[in-house]
Amino acid sequence: MADASIHTPAAPQYVAAVKASAVLNRFTLWAAFLTLSAVCVYPMIWLFLNAFKSTNELFQASWALPETWRWQNFTTAWGHGISRYLLNSVIVALATVTIELLLASMAAYALVVMNFKAKVAIYMGILGGMILPPEVSLFPLFKVMAVTDLYNTYFALILPNVAFGLPFTTFLIRAYMMGIPLDLREAALMDGASEGLVFRSIYLPLCKPVLASAGLIAAMRVWNEFIFALTFIESDSVKTVTIGVMSFAVALRADYGVMMAGLTLSIIPILATFLILQRQFIGGLTQGAVK
Amino acid sequence: MPSRRPATLRQSLTAWLWVAPTLLFLVLFVYGPALANIRYSAYSFSAMSQEMDFVGLANYIRLFADPLFLTGLTNNIAYALISVFFQVAFALTLAAVLEARIFPRFAANSFRTMLFLPSILPVVVVGLIWQLLLAPSLGLVDQALWALGLGEWSRAWLGDPDTAIFAVIMVSQWQWTGYIMALFMVAIRAIPRDLYEAMELEGASGPRIFFNLTVPGARETILIVAIITILGSLKVFDIVWVMTAGGPNHSSEVLGTLMYRAAFRDDTIGYSSTIATVIFFIALTVGMVQIKLQKDH
């Protein structure tokens, strides 16, 4: 790696030119990142500010601050069903994440610690589910929901969401469990503990970090899920936020201020969580997402 | 992996019980329906009818002769190319700059948070916000163009068949570039720091460090992100459905919207299943490439 040139004194003009271009580069990079940040964040600020305006005011000056802060836009939007949609999303997300984490940790546990026939084939069969996009199964799933009377219930969202999430969640948890020493289990079994007890009182507690991260990824996926909610749900009382805001937006085409207030309300929970826990959030969502 | 004796039947039965619920979910809601879908593509029927007419490959012949199929496929490919440029090339560059310690730590962290922000929003909300931002006169994009003296560029971005799909694609870049950037930052952090210091001591320029160290060091992540991005572009549905629903005049259709419309608007289930089967085989091919690439490393 030795390079003679770094020991040779460079001509002073050359050094000055390099320094000047370094300052220029630095300035360009600051400008570029400040612009990009504004492009990413400003649309949300624009939405929040316009949520307080009347439609007239909005069309006159959508970039200006509101003349009067019309809080009633928010109460009107809330009354249009946003609260119900939020609650439905919470129910579907909680149920999906709980079932998914439990089943995926069980499968991962068996795949990591147990010795059984067709193990590799079963693991490949689970991972293969990651390749299939939900679009491919949409109509047959719709038919299943219709025939079983699950159509238009929470289950029509929870069951497919769990199924399509299991491969990746199993993959994440399995990778983490591989790092837990097998002796722990063997010693416990020797002492007469059952497989279930080892899983519950040794593996699950040790897996807390990956369960948190996998749970967050799953929750975000379910919260944003669109195509199942669009296809398997029709009543307002079961609609999740994603589909709710869409019918909301259609119903309020004429009243932009209220519509924007509704959109604002629909993203506040997730935005607040993100801003409070940004480090854990970004860490959790990027961890293991690419392996 | 410790060497083990072959499993006994008893051991296998216990283990199968632990994986059974997961397998059951996959068979009932992923693999079963996907296979049923392939079978449906050989029939002609409507959602509520009891009878299904066997038509063999007629749906496929109709599909490959359908000009909308070509429009959709072309849009999917444009989606994939533009996404690879932004979410692989551009996002990697951004990540490299943020990890190069050019900015003070606080600034770098804030930039990362702000660029990451769009990715936490539901796609539907992003679509609706950008519908408003791109609307003529009301929207900020138009007003910004006028303010910059580029008023003649102003147009109804989503209402114009020439620009609709590109407007949708750009919104998708807006949403995901920062997320992929954060992924790359994790990958870059895994490259040993002293390699960077050695190159800096030698006086290597930023671009040279980027191409000789960052790109090879993050190669694995780059490959996988590229595949995920391409796969995502080929199966895209939600952002297009929310922003244009494939319009105006079908100019922004993608395979996903064609499939959905055929099933749930036109009630031609067999034809819809045919489109879904094509998506299935494209996804399968891309997925195989990914598995092959991962095995090679």
Image (cartoon, coloured by chain):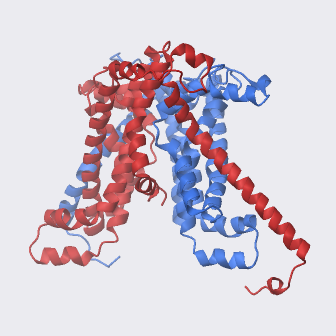
Q: Quadrant of residue B69?
A: top right
Residue A83, percent from left and from top: 31, 27
Please say whether residue A234 is visible from this viewpoint: no
Q: Give the colour chain B carries in the figure.
A: blue
Task: Please tell me which residue lies in front, A56 or B272.
Answer: A56
Count the numbered circles shown. 0
In this image, A85 relative to B153: left or right? left
B33 w.r.t. B151: above or below = below
- Chain (red): A
Residue drawn at (71%, 25%) of the image: B162
Q: Is residue B203 left or right of residue B198?
A: right
Task: Between residue A92 and residue B266, name the one nearer to us.
Answer: A92
Pinpoint residue A124: horizontal percent, then vertical percent.
Answer: 39, 57
Residue under the image location 26 percent in, 31 percent down:
A154
Q: Nearer the viewer, residue A290 or B200?
A: B200
Q: Position of residue B263 (x, y in %)?
A: 45, 22
Residue shown at 30% from the left, 40% from the top: B28
Is A17 on the left or on the right of B276, as rendered?
A: right
Residue A40 position (above or below residue A211): above
Q: Residue at x 59, y 23 (%)?
A: A62
